[in-house]
Image: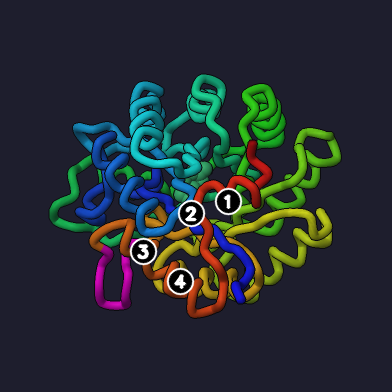
Amino acid sequence: MSGAPVFLSCAVTGGMSVPSQSAAIPVTPEEIVEAAAGAHAAGAAVIHVHVREPETGRPSADLGLFREVLAGIGERCDAIVQPTTGGGVGMTIDERARVVTSCRPEMATFNCGSFNFGIFKVRRRPEMAPWEVEYLEGTRDYVFRNTFGDIERMAELFREAGTKPEYELYDVGHLYNLHHLAEASLVDPPLHLQFVLGVLGANAATLEQLVHMHRTATSLFGSEFTWCTAGVGYPAEFHLAAAALTMGGHVRVGLEDNLRVELDRRAASNAELVEKALTLARLLDRSPVGAAEARDLLGLR
Ligand code: KMH
Ligand code: ZN
């Protein structure tokens, strides 16, 4: 007998962290492709990618870098490659959208509301470059902008590109913003929701809040949606993974969200985080699926 199918997603690098936080964070296109292939081989069906300036590791929206990474991963494996439209500090909404309009990926992230996004509490390390300290410190005054005008426009761009949105929901109000888009006929079912919990400035990564978000989603959209959760930090990443596995959701892990694989051990790779999620899935009687089955679950062509 096999349990309900689950897909694992891996967010391999991120745009709201600086590379000196961990030597395991991939920076160059080659490193990001290698990390993606490793995470896929470990069991991740979906790979969520940001790009970084190869020389510095600073989060970037450069289209050339995205093209290189998307093509490189495509040559190595059949994972669903899901670029970000969230980007990082200082990027405009147009820069963030360009990967969708130009590369037309099968899927990309779609952020559903504006909020404070603070990473200024990250521990400073001696190896951090001045720009990294400035980047972290600057988030005291950073608002992650996704206004109604932005998300309405973004919805049109996704539709034109034929890209399936993964709706990133960091707080309960973001579900109501998405409902507004649905009422305006700017979303195409079946919806795929990502509950990203644990960002300073948004909702907490607790079981109660995950249940609250899931319940609210059901009250707004019925039961015809797929969902996943990403817990930010440790042990949130794995606590929410276990909760999602129990509640019938899918699971995202990765160095974008969390740098530890155990309380006193930092992850050496994204693959290591995927392996732990895979173990949890099997222990909880879920059946991890590959990219082809994940495409079926998500309604991708
Ligand atoms: N860095 C995550 C907290 C995106 O890339 O569009 C948010 C994220 C969103 O993954
Ligand atoms: Zn991201």
Q: Amino acid at mark 4?
A: Phe
Which element is circle 1 on? helix
* Marks 2/1: CA–CA distance: 10 Å
* Marks 1/3: CA–CA distance: 19 Å
Which element is circle 4 on? helix
Residue 94 in the image: state x and y as whole percent: 54, 24
The residue at 46%/74% (across/down) is 280
Which mark, by number, is residue 294? Answer: 1
Disc on the earlier residue, 4 or 1: 4
Nearer to the camera, 292 or 284: 292
Q: Can you say whether 250 is above or below 192 in the image?
A: below
Quarter-of-image position of residue 223 = bottom right
Q: Which residue range is magenta in the image?
A: 259-267
| Mark 4 Cα shell of 10 Å, populated few (<14), some (14-19), many (≥20) | many
Q: Amino acid at mark 3?
A: Leu
Q: Can you say whether 25 is above or below 157 in the image?
A: below
Which mark, by number, is residue 112? Answer: none
Mark nearer the viewer, 2 or 1: 1
* Marks 4/1: CA–CA distance: 21 Å
Q: Is residue 113 visible?
A: no
Which mark, by number, is residue 238? Answer: 4
| Mark 3 Cα shell of 10 Å, populated few (<14), some (14-19), many (≥20) | many
The residue at 23%/58% (across/down) is 124
Which residue in the protein does label 3 denote? 273
| Mark 2 Cα shell of 10 Å, populated few (<14), some (14-19), many (≥20) | many
Mark nearer the viewer, 3 or 4: 3
Residue 190 in the image: state x and y as whole percent: 74, 46
